[in-house]
Image (spheres, rainbow, N blue to C red):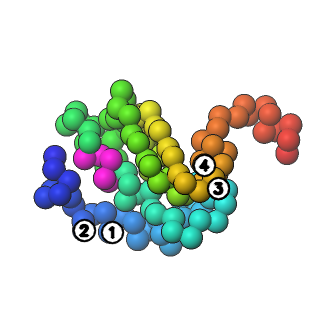
Amino acid sequence: MRIDTQFDVDFADEIAKFESYNKHIYRPNSYLHKWWARRCGSTFRTILKHLVTDEAKQDYYAAGGLRGKIILDPMVGGGTTLHEAIRLGANVIGADIDPIPILQAKASLSEIALTDLQTAF
């Protein structure tokens, strides 16, 4: 599917309205640190779904679809692209000239054992 001619802007806008109202509720793992230009994960999910070749997984609500793919985000920012790509099964590479987004992305994407969390809190 070509994103430049077949991207469903109306759908992306409609679904982003719900998320943008309360981002901290819909995407809590991305909100460890205030990032002024944070983008809606739903928008990036819609964009990334255009890379899915399996028709059964191209639907916005279908799980996965990017297993075996590598997504490069050269301007990590708030890490939205990384989070959404991982949720769809992709491997990710993120970079940024600013060290703050890199630190935030590492923290929010790190796996932690539930027992460690329970001990800490």
Q: Is 4 placed left or right of 92 in the picture?
A: left
- Residue 32 in sight here: yes
Q: Distance from label 3 to label 4 (Cα)?
A: 5 Å
Labels 2 and 3: the sequence-earlier one: 2
Q: Distance from label 2 to label 3 (Cα)?
A: 33 Å
The residue tagged 2 is: 10
Determine whether 82 is above or below 13 in the image: above
Q: Residues within 10 Å of mark 4 (few under 14, many from 20)?
A: some
Q: Amino acid at mark 3?
A: Ile
**What numbered label is drawn on residue 14?**
1
Q: Give the image quarter of residue 54.
A: top left
- In reply to whether residue 49 is colored magenta, the answer given is yes
Most common secondary structure along the magenta stretch: helix
Q: What residue is at 86 percent from the left and 37 percent from the top?
A: 119
The residue tagged 3 is: 100
Labels 3 and 1: the sequence-earlier one: 1
The residue tagged 4 is: 102
Q: Residue furthest front?
A: 97
Q: Residues within 10 Å of mark 3 (few under 14, many from 20)?
A: some
Say whether marks 2 and 3 touch (CB < 8 Å).
no
Say whether marks 2 and 1 touch (CB < 8 Å).
yes
Q: Which residues are magenta?
A: 46-50
Q: Amino acid at mark 2?
A: Asp
